[in-house]
Image: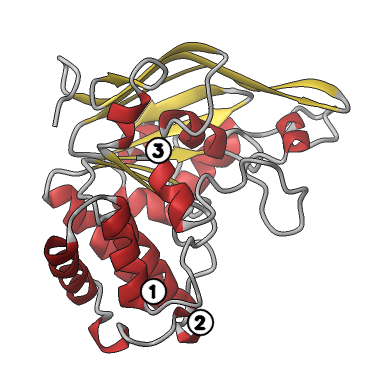
Amino acid sequence: MPTTARGLAIEARGLRKSYRSKAGEQLVLDGVDLVVPAGTVTALLGPNGAGKTTTVGVLSTLLAPDAGTVRVAGYDVVREPDAVRAVIGVTGQITAVDDLLTGAENLRLMADLNHLGRAAGRRRTADLLERFGLTDAAAKPVSTYSGGMKRKLDLAMTLVGSPSVVFLDEPTTGLDPRSRRTLWAEVRALVAEGTTILLTTQYLEEADQLADSVAVLHGGRVVAEGTPAELKQVHDAGTLDDVFLALTEPPADDPAEDSADATGVGARSGTTAGPTDSPTDSPTDRENAR
């Protein structure tokens, strides 16, 4: 698949995005610069409402940027959205599976949406069911699956089209430790195969375990980036949690955690839901991001 001349799978320069609300225009991304080398994992960290999901939405062509340039796999997300969609996969915050279908039927649906053909689609379905340990449950309705099984199926559906760039927006939220580590193993396997991954997560240990590089988003900008070890060294911190807290400490006179929360972007349970809480809410919406 094409990438930029410098081997960057993702490159954003001066990315800006705002939303209109009853309170007026809310600026979420204020000149974000982000680069992700091909075949690596970059973790995008930030408080709730910092704009992580908005960033994923723009990179995956689901949201239009207000300003800046953004290229994914060498393609401009504004001028060449179809080319971008052909090489990416998106796993959103909300598991985008159809509970009324079986696991195999969900995967075959994605195969049809990717125009694989019946025989190729069935082969791809069988391969992914085996890879994610879902073969025994393939013929069962997804409504009977555990949360961890649904998340594995969700990621498998993202991989049906063999994307070279995958966006994982808080993929392990709500999973138990065993299921989380199973998903980590799959992420590592994907990177070993040459896939590029942009990961957003609220679990700092997850970023420390998986990420080749970390970017911290706060106040609409990337305020720090580097390897986990570099960030801990620069900030004289023992863990990424300490780095995160140091970089995102709100001003003493600021009663709000983050003004961008008013947009609902990246909102979780207990917060106001916005239009971009989950870039992909259904298998069809997921296909629209290809």
Task: Determine contact: label 1, label 3, CB under 8 Å.
Answer: no
Q: Is residue 35 above or below residue 189?
A: above
266 left or right of 165? right
- In front of the other: 283 or 145: 283
Q: Nearer the viewer, mark 2 or mark 1?
A: 2
Q: Earlier in the sequence, mark 3 or mark 2?
A: 2
Q: Position of residue 38 (x, y in %)?
A: 19, 32
Q: Residue at x 54, y 58 (%)?
A: 94
Question: Where does the image place residue 25, in percent across and percent down from the top left?
Answer: 77, 19
Q: Label 2 belongs to which residue? A: 143
Task: Pick the residue in front: 178 or 106.
Answer: 106
Q: List the residue tagged with mark 1.
A: 179
Where residue 238 is drawn, which disc sits there?
Answer: none
Quadrant including the N terminus:
top left
Upstream in sequence: badge 1 or badge 3: 1
- Give the amino acid type for the residue marked by disc 1 in the picture: Ser
Mark 2 or 1, nearer chain start: 2
Of helix, strand and loop, which one carries label 3? helix
Q: Which residue is painted at 28% across and 57% down in the image?
A: 112
Element under label 2?
helix
